[in-house]
Image: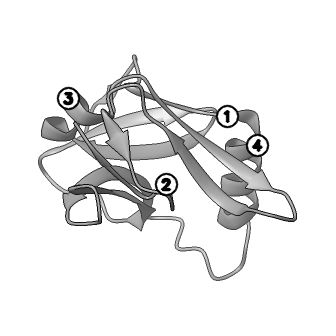
Amino acid sequence: METTLSTPVKLSPNAIAELKRLMGEASHDATQYLRIGVKGGGCSGLSYVLGFDKHEEDDEIFDIEGIPVVMKNAHGIYLFGMEVDYSDGLNARGFVFKNPNASSSCGCGSSFAV
């Protein structure tokens, strides 16, 4: 298993703090990685994937501030340069995707078009 040095996506300091908090919970499976990716569907054509998952053979592996991250190589064209942030405000709470490759996105921010 090889870890790639350059990361196609960035995690904001708020996202890193929230992910490390989640990873520190007793229910977290320490053998899992943070998966960042895309899947077909959503109101704009593609939806973001963000969650803890097992490493698969065709995954690229990254380390972002001590957080083990996996992503399918093919997803890089959609996600390169994207930043994942975490908002803890009164009006919006959760992970936010800032994707420079998206030609449009939906109002909920969880799907996009390229």
Q: Residues within 10 Å of mark 2 (few under 14, many from 20)?
A: some
Dots 4, 1 in contact, CB < 8 A = yes
The numbered dot on residue 14 is 4
Relative placement, left or right, of 98 versus 25 is left
Q: Where, quadrant-wise, is the C terminus in this rendering?
A: top left
Residue 1 at what x, y percent from top left?
25, 39
Dots 3, 4 in contact, CB < 8 A = no
Q: Residue at x 54, y 65 (%)?
A: 30
Image quadrant where residue 64 sits: top right
Kind of residue at disc 1? Ser
Dots 3, 1 in contact, CB < 8 A = no
Relative placement, left or right, of 113 versus 9 is left
Q: Residue at x 52, y 73 (%)?
A: 29
Image quadrant where residue 19 sits: bottom right
Kind of residue at disc 3? Ile
Which residue extends farthest bottom?
27
Q: Earlier in the sequence, mark 3 or mark 4?
A: 4
Q: CA distance from mark 3 to mark 1?
A: 20 Å
The numbered dot on residue 12 is 1
Kind of residue at disc 4? Asn
Please give the residue where the numbered disc 2 appears in the rendered image: 109
Q: Nearer the viewer, residue 6 or 84?
A: 84
Q: Nearer the viewer, residue 78 or 5?
A: 78
What is the secondary structure assignment of the residue under circle 2? loop
Q: Nearer the viewer, mark 4 or mark 2?
A: 2
Q: CA distance from mark 4 to mark 1?
A: 5 Å
Kind of residue at disc 2? Gly
